[in-house]
Amino acid sequence: MDFDLSEDQRLLKESVDRLIAGEYSFEQRKKYLAEAAGWSAAMWSHLTELGLLGLPFPETLGGFGGGPVETAIVMEAFGRGLVLEPFFATIILGGGLLRRAAPDAMRGALAPQVAAGKLKLAFAHVERHSRYDLSDVTTTAARDGAGYVLNGAKSVVLHGDAADRIFVTARLSGGRRDPDGIGLFLVDPATPGVSRRGYGTQDGLRAAEISLANARVTADDMVHDNALAPIEHVVDEAIAALCAEAVGAMQAMQELTLEYLKTRKQFGRPIGSFQALQHRSVDMLVAVEQARSMALFAAISAAEENPVERRKAISAAKVQIGRSARLVGQEAIQLHGGIGMTAEYAVGHYFKRTTMIDQLYGDADTHLARLARLGGLFGKAA
């Protein structure tokens, strides 16, 4: 298999890498974080100008026509920059749901607005009790005349405080963990009965708690009446994107640590000259490259239509990403010593982000258990 980038992919990588190197240093990131929204509107405009907001959409809808590999290229660069803007929530999650779940008319109306940077999206699915079970939905959607009335609460809605429209799951029928009967609605957060409370997450990003109290939506707001299958596919694509982002963050930690070992002196010599620390530095490099290989595997597998084979690949990648991120992050902190624990130094922020990525949509232990239930990467489910 040819793993070389195509000419278009290479140009994409160069443009994104150049943007992050020039506009997203750690000091610049601090300034973006201090803005009222917790991210930079100017940077959002830059992403729009580069065409990155149209990444997953076809050219007929004003998009770039990219797939999971192109997404991975962008997300790896964003991982190196610890990007704060709502790209993942709007383009990966929201854009994914537009592509895989929305009717043609809705997709045709909204995708160009998203690609032009005029519409930000979020995905409200997780509930406090649901853990990592995508079918565990208790928010309800009751038919009322020509529309629906939504009641329930959603947690940790990534960039939900900035979204112009929010995809919300609600149960139309069935029991709490029934895979059937989960509806998907596109809700205006200004709708009466919808309230949201925004807050900062541990890694510097934004999220929101969203409450729905007799929130009335129209039949046109329904995206899908049995949405679990497309949601699962979008989440698998999102995990593949997160794996690529984690690789970018891990590489940054490894490079920062190597540079520190070369410059920090003890007993009159650079600490990188001590063999024991050299071995630990090599272990970090090996872990990064293992993660990179599995992130590429996830990106290639994310478009797989067979859900079982896709989930095997995604879970295997998530396991490796979680393990590598923990090793690289812990070694980076320890080899930096006390400075690695300070908020003023970048390495701790990278470790926070990779730790959060491990927790999103199932940590390494959760995906290892799922992989075992599916019979392993190359086996058959029992």
Image (spheres, grey):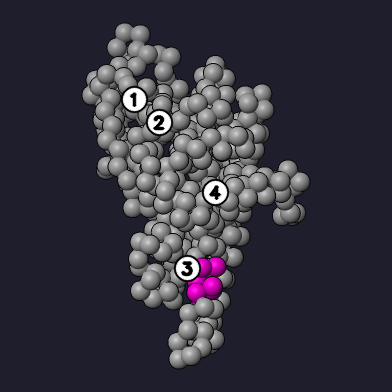
Q: Is residue 381 left or right of residue 178?
A: right
Which residue bears the numbered disc 4?
Answer: 23
Which residue does the image show at 42% across and 19% down from the upper left?
Answer: 222
- The local crowd at label 3, few if under 14, some if 14 to 19, many if 20 or more residues have their Cα within 10 Å, is many
Q: Secondary structure at mark 4?
A: helix
Dots 1 and 3: beta carbons under 8 Å? no
The alpha-carbon separation of the residues under discs 3 and 4 comes to 25 Å
Which is more N-terminal, label 4 or label 2? 4
Residue type of the residue flagged with mark 1: Pro
Q: Which residues are magenta?
A: 255-261
- The local crowd at label 4, few if under 14, some if 14 to 19, many if 20 or more residues have their Cα within 10 Å, is some
Which is more N-terminal, label 4 or label 1? 4
Which label is found at residue 356? none
Main SS category, magenta section: helix
Q: Position of residue 104 (x, y in %)?
A: 56, 19
Which residue bears the numbered disc 1?
Answer: 189
Which residue bears the numbered disc 2?
Answer: 163
Which residue does the image show at 26% across and 28% down from the upper left?
Answer: 195
The alpha-carbon separation of the residues under discs 2 and 1 comes to 8 Å
- The local crowd at label 1, few if under 14, some if 14 to 19, many if 20 or more residues have their Cα within 10 Å, is many
Q: Check the picture and name the quadrant holding the N terminus.
A: bottom right
